[in-house]
């Protein structure tokens, strides 16, 4: 069961709902997003998988909750599926902070990284997940740019945000879920900013190149393709990184291609070998997630390197880059 | 090679380019879209698949073409990949017409169909493909509605179009490529129109339900899920229709689910058996593409039934619906 | 950790190992296969997923175990992977019994089933799983045949078993993992028994028909294809049943095709809707797993119907079969 | 249409059938396998894809052919599917020869290769394809071994061949289609030869390790895993090579892992970048197909390097191997 609070409720309202839940033998886990707070409700559940019951929670309780003045609605989630318990990660409301961004930027810059990616608008599979900081995030990125002399790249998710994002970012990113969002491709095709076009999670090479063609056909010739793993039957990795896409794209197209081993595998322990494999296969760049404390990240912590791991990776990258007769650009 | 004409060029300009091409031993195939005309160039090509040659066309010819006043740009497409020849179907510019829509609507209505889907905004994998008629298409659909007493459903592809589409349509459709276009889900979640949410082409059941949750969380509780096939390794069908999704969704959710055997298979000869299979598995509705002359359709002809085939299907549908103890709503 | 006992050890030897384990704070779960007993060892494990530890078990303990006279070897299974805990299901050693077979056969026969499948040789993903009863199982099947007047179908897994299985069975089955075991296809092609050829778990329609062609080319024209689900990215079902394969095979080939919704979905709750969907799509037969007490089955219990569920399914089958103008053969 | 000749017919019999076909306006393409000759029949076919016709060939003609004394059977292949034309490659009967083997072995040995793989028993998707030379092939491999001082690896496809293959080979290979052929795994588990276990074309990492466990549990601890690409939706490559499997296996298991970029991609132009990527990701060996004249190979020519390409690859391999701090073993 998920309790959705009204838009402008305050901490006291949330407290009141938590007390109400507690009095009924349930525990509430509030999660404050940009727009509102939702409360995941656990406890009072029968044996796992019991069909027919609504999370083991008395239906009349839901109605009682819905009648509280600060509650907008109550989402009842049917058992077997357990949408709430599987997808609703009740974590403490830590904002991804300015300090964290600056620490990371400073550290990776000093190791030779020249471009900084940060997510101001973030896609989240669940509507209750973290969706980014919006314009405030763009400003933070912009500040990091001037402080450390890095170019800034960030995702744009919808046509109406393109102008805003262009004001702050040096490079735009189109995410995997939007690879075939044609209106968005049209819109970034009208700008003159370089665009990183992530491969759709089950896009063929041909569909990917055709998506790039939308941007090119709009007049923007600065498209950078980014391999980020495809969806297969394998379950130990989040995606299966298609390293062969790198030489294939080189054969089929004149566009540069970079690799994202963090998304491509979803596992920190695979980022280093898959970075080196990407280089050996001819990648033109790497997109690596780094976090000062990955285990506290609001999103994608499992696939982020620590700063120390990133420092250890850089000399290995240098070594393989040289072995294939290329050089690393660090300024 | 694809010649992209300038936005406001006229028939004479196109004619001039065609003559120029003919004089150089090539044939041009113009295709007029909503915004501009592009000309696919064939001929002068060596044996299929010859590596190294650029479509067998003299590079200096491309430059000559680009210098013509009505030509905006010339896209050279490298062989092996043959982007142009595989994806650019140079068909005669037949507009999907009012007459065709009315003929189809009248025919399917008299067989018992109660909802009419037409595409005003159409996603196309290639930027040079048919992208729909826009508002003019919406008006046609609206006219068909009043004439035949059918509800109208049409796709909306971007948040800024939602209001416009709501003016004309009774039901909104979110297409497979936009299942995780969260800004669009948010936007349709703010309307009160029923929304058909197509399954993403490689979306898990869980991701699909979470996409529905975006719309529900926005306040719109009228979500209809639509199974339309998933992407697998199989090549004889366009998609693999996941019939098991129908009973699974019934177990996991209270939302209605319908099936799209036309998209789900991509083959006209499979539409009838897969319609019947969907019903036997518990579908709440069928979305079937019908065209008076599928072989002349601008898009998806191979998967459209003729009117005669649709007429033959309806009694079979009735028969299986009754066999499982349900009834067909025809008004 | 898995303790593999020597081939001819007896119950006392096993008991001694269990006591040894208990004295060290661990619990042993013996599992007796046809050839030997293995003991899964649980307990003494740190928090799930702790990297670096070897199942939380003192390495010297393994050596001590290996020195016991009745122990052949000790398999240490590294954490993260947790091969043992995930794949080793320590269930009580219940033999799939004669009584269970006869009860099921009698019950399904009286509902109209005319063919009985039982597994004498069973493929198991893990070497420590249940691998069937061998010739003893064949004899049981044969007995059920004469008692209830049913034809018998059973799997053959290797060329040297073909003669033996032919002695007892009326119909041979080639399992999904052996669809491209060409020596086996050659061998059954030399018999005159009908062969059910299951689709490989990621075989294309074309590969499947070519596998059939091996048997046909050997001179055996009695091939029956069986759709049993394909492997996709979806995780809520064991496989994705490709219902469209049924009409496709009908178009491409003169061979009969049957469906296996038990394997095809892996979920008991989907067997009924997917049986009806298969019929509506044109299947020539159904292969349905039934077990008097599925929760106690050694293998595949989650996908077996109870006898009551099978009884409830039969009239629904009759109804849909009639709806599409066909009839059920029940003798 | 495919004419299957009787087992012991001679060249004259074949000639007679060809003449018969010619007299009826058709062309015959004989293909002599180890056991018999089959003749693919082309010509007299209506427009591609015409449904209903049986290859455009008069049915009575088939009967006439079947009555010829040297003809065993005539396989009529239904149109749309065109099994014959797509899968029956009527190539001249060139035996993969001793000279070709010795030339290749000598060349790769002098570049530093230390193990030679050759296929004596070959799996072929179609029953009419090349299935290897059998024991004659094993003898050739053995000769190459003594001449060039290389270890020899070859595939074993069925339990009864294990002893024969062990006589000649130093290392056994289990092919992708047999990864879950448990009787075969049991059998090689009883030998003391190292076994290269190819990943099944849609096997998860876990299933692959469990297949290895069959061999290990049989007592043979010398298992070498081989990544050879998995099946995905992508169509430009034969398989999608899962480079991440290399570091994953290193984490989960103590077994060595090698890579097969020839099978893994199916494209010669990808073998070099994917070899280097495999090394950077930590592979313990490479399995690369080399052919003096790939375009004349009976099988897999498209993915074989020429000797010159192999010579160019070796220094690149050396360079990347050194970059990651390892060394190449060349004797």
Image: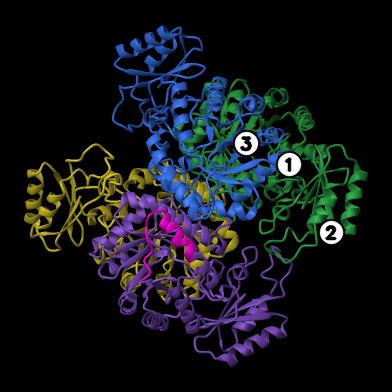
Chain colours: A yellow, B purple, C blue, D green
Q: Residue D26 carries which label?
A: 2
Residue B31 is situated, as x and y percent measured from the top left of the image, at 57, 80
User: Which corner quadrant of the image does residue B282 belong to?
Assistant: bottom left
* Residue projecting furthest to the right: D12
Mark 1 on the same chain as mark 3:
no
Q: Residues within 10 Å of mark 1 (few under 14, many from 20)?
A: many
Residue C55 is situated, as x and y percent measured from the top left of the image, at 36, 25
**Disc 1, SS:** helix
State the residue at coordinates (40%, 81%): B144
Q: Indicate which disc, 3 or 2, sits on the residue closer to the N terminus.
A: 2
* Residue projecting furthest to the bottom: B12
Residue B247 is situated, as x and y percent measured from the top left of the image, at 38, 50
Q: Is residue A330 visible?
A: no
Q: What whole-number distance in Å separates the C-alpha atoms at marks 1 and 2?
A: 23 Å
Question: In the image, is B289 to the left or to the right of B198?
Answer: right
Q: Does the magenta stretch include residue B322?
A: yes
Q: What whole-number distance in Å separates the C-alpha atoms at marks 1 and 3?
A: 23 Å
Question: In the image, is A146 to the left or to the right of B83?
Answer: left
User: Which corner quadrant of the image does residue A63 belong to?
Assistant: bottom left
**Disc 2, SS:** loop
User: Which corner quadrant of the image does residue B200 belong to?
Assistant: bottom left
Magenta residues, start to end: B314-331
Locate the C terminus of chain A and report the quarter of the image it occupies: bottom left
Residue A149 is situated, as x and y percent measured from the top left of the image, at 34, 62
Which one is in front, D294 or D163?
A: D163
Q: Nearer the viewer, mark 1 or mark 3?
A: 1
Q: Residue C217 carries which label?
A: 1
State the residue at coordinates (72%, 67%): D47
Q: Which of marks 3 and 2 is in front?
A: 2
For mark 3, what is the residue? D175
Relative height, residue C218 to residue C297 (above, below): below
Q: Mark 3 lies on which chain?
A: D
């Amino acid at each position: 069961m998920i309790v959705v609070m009204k838009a402008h409720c305050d901490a006291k309202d949330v407290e009141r709902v938590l007390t109400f839940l507690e009095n009924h033998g349930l525990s509430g886990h509030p999660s404050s997003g940009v727009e509102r707070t939702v409360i995941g409700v656990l406890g009072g559940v029968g044996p796992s998988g019991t069909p027919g019951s609504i999370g083991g929670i008395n239906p009349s309780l839901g109605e009682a909750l819905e009648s509280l003045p600060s509650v907008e609605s109550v989402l009842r989630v049917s058992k077997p599926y357990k949408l709430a318990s599987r997808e609703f990660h009740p974590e403490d409301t830590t904002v991804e902070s300015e300090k964290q961004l600056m620490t990371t930027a400073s550290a990776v810059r000093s190791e030779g990284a020249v471009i900084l990616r940060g997510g101001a608008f973030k896609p989240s599979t669940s509507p209750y997940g973290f969706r980014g900081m919006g314009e405030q995030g763009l400003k933070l990125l912009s500040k990091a740019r001037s402080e450390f002399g890095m170019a800034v790249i960030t995702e744009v998710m919808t046509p109406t945000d393109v102008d805003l994002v262009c004001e702050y970012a040096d490079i735009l990113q189109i995410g995997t879920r939007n690879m075939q969002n044609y209106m968005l491709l049209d819109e970034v095709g009208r700008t003159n900013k370089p665009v990183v076009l992530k491969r759709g999670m089950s896009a063929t090479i041909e569909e990917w190149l055709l998506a790039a063609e939308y941007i090119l056909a709009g007049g923007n010739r600065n498209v950078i393709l980014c391999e980020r793993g495809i969806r297969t039957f394998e379950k130990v990795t989040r995606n299966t990184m298609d390293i062969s896409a790198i030489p294939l794209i080189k054969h089929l197209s004149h566009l540069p291609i970079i690799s994202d081993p963090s998304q491509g595998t979803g596992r920190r322990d695979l980022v280093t070998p898959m970075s080196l494999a990407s280089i050996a296969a001819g990648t033109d760049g790497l997109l690596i997630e780094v976090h000062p404390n990955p285990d506290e990240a609001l999103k994608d912590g499992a696939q982020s390197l620590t700063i120390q791991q990133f420092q250890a990776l850089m000399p290995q990258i240098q070594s393989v880059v040289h072995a294939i007769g290329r050089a690393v650009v660090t300024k």
